[in-house]
Image (cartoon, helix red, strand yellow):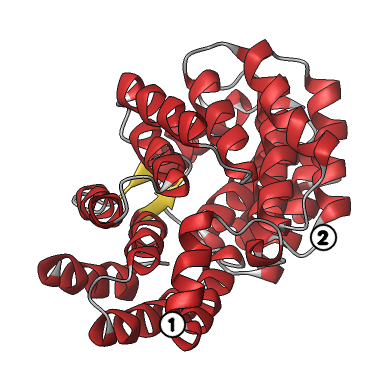
Amino acid sequence: MRKCLMLLSILILSATGTSASNEWLSPIDKKYQSKNSALFFKFDQARDLLDSWAGQQEKLQEADRILRSILEEDVTFAPAYREYGRLFIMAGHINSNNFKDGSLGPAEASILKSIEIEPEYADSYVLLGHLYTNMKRYDDAELVLVKAEEIGTETPWLQLNWGELLKKRGEYSSAMERYQSVINKGTPNKKAYGSALNGITTIYIFTKEYDKANTAYLRELEYDPDHAWTWGNYSRFLLFGYKDVDRAIETGRKAIQLMDYGMGRFTLACALYTKWAMLKDNPATALLAQQFFDEAWNLYPYLERVIEETQAYSFTRVTSVALSQRLSQS
């Protein structure tokens, strides 16, 4: 575990709602709350930080500090190991389903440690299912989620993690039912509710029901208007899926205004370069086009990567052609 904690510090340093604690407290958590209320209070603080995480490095650092202090006092405090599993997953996250090399192995070790101490820890099996889905170990994910169901848990993450697994397997109707069950039941866990909304959005995107996906994104933003990643994801959808470059620019700017992060900058730059490509050949709009280009260049000047991305979509192929011509003339 010591090696895992050392690696976590490295991951946090390189990493670019409402607490669940009021919603579901498992029998195992209640056991540790009774055993040492002071340590459990600290654990709850760490869990709240991770529940509210949306890419902020400082929250991971603070949660790490709190969890370390718990395990320094009680090396058998199983909930802390489970939460360290979440922390490793978050610290290793790059974007979408991409993770830093070596980050998910320590997450598995930490979650398994919590299960070694408490073999009936259903919520740890729920988290392990999420981890195995991200590791593309889908059969293992199914086994541990079934195990969690057999033990019994009320956490909304059971349904959400089933939804993610079913979505990866292309079972979109079944996945939608899992996400919708969280919406229908409701939860005070803001992160979980937002994840259910996002799950529904992504199902509509995968099934190419773009009008429904657009409405679903608006529902996400109405629920949590300060979530930069949602604005950034919406911007990407508007550009590459919904073919609305103006709104893609508007929402992309909102995303990086809330949090200046890499994927948000890249998506907005793609939208701005696209607007430039659409306007540049008209003398009446050439000056305005250059302004879009300059803004895009300041955000992301690596044109080869933009060309690679924009040539993959019919709506933005004009962008890749225009940028390729520009590079050939330079």
Which residue corresponds to the image point at 33% horizontal and 19% vertical from the top-left? 139
x and y percentages locating residue 278 in the rendered image: 73, 35
Which residue corresponds to the image point at 50% horizontal and 74% vertical from the top-left? 33
Q: Looking at the image, which is closer to me, 63 or 45? A: 45
Which residue corresponds to the image point at 72% horizontal and 52% vertical from the top-left? 231
152 versus 117 height, above or below: above
Asked if residue 315 shows in the view, the reply is no
162 versus 45 height, above or below: above
259 versus 296 height, above or below: below
Q: Local crowd at mark 1 within 10 Å, few (<14), some, or many (≥20)?
A: few
Say which quarter of the image contains residue 291.
bottom right
Q: Local crowd at mark 2 within 10 Å, few (<14), some, or many (≥20)?
A: few
Residue indicated by mark 2: 225
Secondary element type, mark 1: loop
Residue indicated by mark 1: 36
Q: Residue furthest left?
A: 3
Secondary element type, mark 2: loop
Earlier residue among tags 1 and 2: 1
Amino acid marked by disc 2 = Pro
x and y percentages locating residue 2 in the rendered image: 12, 72
Quadrant of the snapshot with the N terminus = bottom left
Say which quarter of the image contains residue 214.
top right
